Image (cartoon, helix red, strand yellow):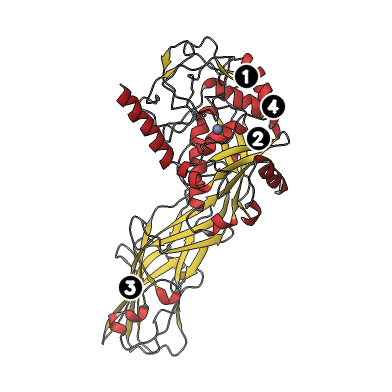
Amino acid sequence: MQIRVLFLLLAFLLSHITYGQLLKPCNTLKSVHNEWVTRFQKRLPIDNPLRGSLTLYFPVKFFITSKLHDQSGTISPQKLMEEICHLNQLYKQANISFYLESQPTIISSSSYEGVETEFELGQLLQSYKTTNAIPVYIVENALDACGFNVIFQGINKGIVLSAECYKAKGALLAHEIGHFLGLPHTFQGWEGIAFDYTLKAPEHWENVKVERADGSNCRIAGDGFCDTAPDYLNLRWSCSDSSKSPISLVDPMGKSFFSDGSLIMGYALDPCPNRFSKEQIMTMRAYAEEFYPTLFKGDLPAKINHAMPVVNTPLENSQVNLSNGVNFSWEKVPGTYKYIIEVSPMPNMALITARYEISSDSLSFITKQLINGRKYFWRLRSLNLFSFCSTVSKICSFSTVLATANTDLKDKTYSIILNNPISTSEGMSLNLADEQFPLQLILLNNSGQTIFHKNYSQYVGHTNLSISVSAFPPGQYTLTVRNAQKTQSHSVVIMP
Ligand SMILES: [Zn+2]
């Protein structure tokens, strides 16, 4: 039995080491309005826990230090989208939803250096432009903690997260927002206390009563909630399959129990924490209505949507003439503040070899910076203020060719097709000056059907030949030019 306890304590320690390189999980000790929370809890349980089905929409504003922002991939826009998607999934049970107030602001890393206390940090946060949103700061090191809700002069100044912990997918942000909305830790009173958990717990720590396993003092002890199990574990721990703590704890009456690792306001390691209790949810919603009514009033929830980007060109499996550049184009995604094109030589996009950031007012981008004769895969991301879970397009592919690489055109240094892709309004422009007549032009669609066929019996001179394509739907086509000497085929794309 002693060996088992030792093993489990060792497991505790290992968990602690692998998470955030010994950063403390959380520096938050209590909420700003702790007395209000205590008074509210005395009124629990309250019927109608969600006060109707009204969804509370909270704007969140991210600030990222310049050093982190410059480290490619450390704090990627993709991670931000995934983070808020996950946050919204965790808060769905509370009927609370988050969106971005505006795109992240980059703040100076140097201003953060030398900050060693919560007071100094509060002073620094005070200097940033305040927004009507929950401020979340991603910094190199949040005072040696994974995160905390910073209180300065009696006001919530915002949530500060260490980059190392933010990078992992988990409930850290949800936990800190829980604090922002008034929730204490499930192990309230045990913060910062070193304790041998094989021993019986004391009756209280300073002025916080220790919660008993039988629930007899749940309203006035620990976290003050009666639908959260007693919890004394103030260090990171791995939960079992049933979300219970790996060791039993002993309450002041000598009764054994297990802590509940599913609660977001505890310290169980991810992916265990995934829920708030009903009383916690009631408290957060009442707290928000009491102290942050302007945060979630007047927003436009209709903007919250699923916004998977739809891409137009290059068409799937098409051949693209690199001499004209690869033209990426897509449909507008509402709420986008930046589009990201990712290009990869691999179908699963495991290796991104080119990434282009495009402002939200553009719906296309042309590049010649790809290699000829390669197959590429690409997708489009929408960095979106209102949509987070499905903001990436499906993966499409295309191949790069040079028109002059055509085997029948070895002796030529120019393309017979002067514009490719071809816009519907412009029409196809051909240079046939060096071709022998009579010749045939045949245009096949992607299904191999002939949609245009014309014989030219005479030399058409130096003037470029223009062929209207307005009757043809956008897509990939094959143009064949045939005369007595040779036949040449070109892949062409007609754009909307
Ligand atoms: Zn905490």
Vertical position of residue 368 compared to residue 328: above or below: below
- Disc 4 target residue: 290
Residue neighbourhood size for the residue with mark 4, other residues' Cα within 10 Å, grouped as few (<14), some (14–19), many (≥20): few
- Between circles 4 and 1, the one closer to the viewer is 1
In-image side of 339 versus 476 (left or right): right
- Between circles 3 and 1, the one closer to the viewer is 1
Q: Is mark 4 within 8 Å of ligand 1?
A: no
- Disc 3 target residue: 373
Name the kind of residue labelled 1 in the image.
Answer: Asn
Name the residue located 33 percent from the left edge and 89 percent from the top edge: 436
- Real-space Cα separation, disc 1 to disc 2, in angstroms: 35 Å
- Disc 2 target residue: 296
Q: Is mark 3 within 8 Å of ligand 1?
A: no
Name the kind of residue labelled 4 in the image.
Answer: Glu
Give residue 200's quadrant in the image.
top left
Q: Looking at this view, is 426 or 1 the one in front?
A: 1
Q: Earlier in the sequence, mark 3 or mark 2?
A: 2
Residue neighbourhood size for the residue with mark 3, other residues' Cα within 10 Å, grouped as few (<14), some (14–19), many (≥20): some
- Real-space Cα separation, disc 3 to disc 2, in angstroms: 53 Å
Q: Earlier in the sequence, mark 4 or mark 1?
A: 1
Q: Earlier in the sequence, mark 1 or mark 2?
A: 1
Q: Earlier in the sequence, mark 3 or mark 1?
A: 1
- Between circles 3 and 2, the one closer to the viewer is 2
Vertical position of residue 139 compared to residue 247: above or below: below
